[in-house]
């Protein structure tokens, strides 16, 4: 009985702890610029932050870090703590396959976010 109670409490705690993080990761589409050029600038800033996390985690052997927990956890933490609302929104708007890829096509990434922004604000 104690094990079941402990397991139930642990699951409840994990679920409650995850809620604030998920809320922080929601994209505020209103703060994203509507111009592709401005989104490309945000893309460059996001890649700069990604490369800082890559160096911090010493994961220099690859260009896509979506499978490297140290990199994506560090970068997500940095973005959650960022005071630049547009950069934070851009980061979490990027699909995961692009978000942690430092060699991505910045124009393609910005265009993808621009389309998602337009759909979200319809």
Image: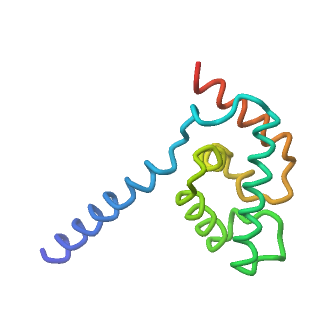
Residue 67 picture quarter: bottom right
Quarter of the image containing the N terminus? bottom left
- Of all residues, the one furthest to the top in this rendering is 122
Residue for point 60% across, 50% down: 84
- In the rendered image, residue 103, in percent from the top left (x then y), is placed at 86, 58
Please give left or right for residue 108 compared with residue 116 in the image.
Answer: right
Whether 121 is drawn above or below 54: the answer is: above
- Of all residues, the one furthest to the bottom in this rendering is 58
Whether 112 is drawn above or below 96: the answer is: above
Residue for point 55% across, 64% down: 77
Residue for point 60% across, 69% down: 74
- In the rendered image, residue 11, in percent from the top left (x then y), is placed at 30, 64
Please give left or right for residue 61 compared with residue 25 in the image.
Answer: right
- In the rendered image, residue 15, in percent from the top left (x then y), is placed at 33, 58
- Of all residues, the one furthest to the front in this rendering is 83
Whether 117 is drawn above or below 20: the answer is: above
- In the rendered image, residue 2, in percent from the top left (x then y), is placed at 14, 77
Whether 87 is drawn above or below 82: the answer is: above
Which residue occupies the foreground of this view, 32 or 8? Answer: 32
Quarter of the image containing the C terminus? top right
Question: Total label count?
Answer: 0
């Amino acid at each position: 009985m104690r094990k079941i109670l402990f397991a139930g409490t642990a699951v409840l705690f994990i679920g409650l702890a995850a809620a604030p993080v998920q809320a922080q990761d929601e994209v505020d589409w209103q703060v994203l610029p509507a111009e592709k050029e401005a989104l490309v600038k945000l893309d460059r800033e996001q890649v700069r932050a990604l490369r800082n996390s890559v160096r911090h985690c010493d994961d220099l052997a690859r260009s896509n870090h979506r499978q490297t927990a140290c990199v994506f956890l560090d970068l997500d933490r940095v973005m959650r703590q960022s005071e630049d609302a547009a950069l934070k929104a851009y980061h979490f708007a990027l699909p995961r396959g692009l978000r942690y890829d430092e060699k991505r096509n910045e124009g393609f990434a910005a265009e993808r976010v621009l389309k998602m922004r337009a759909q979200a604000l319809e």
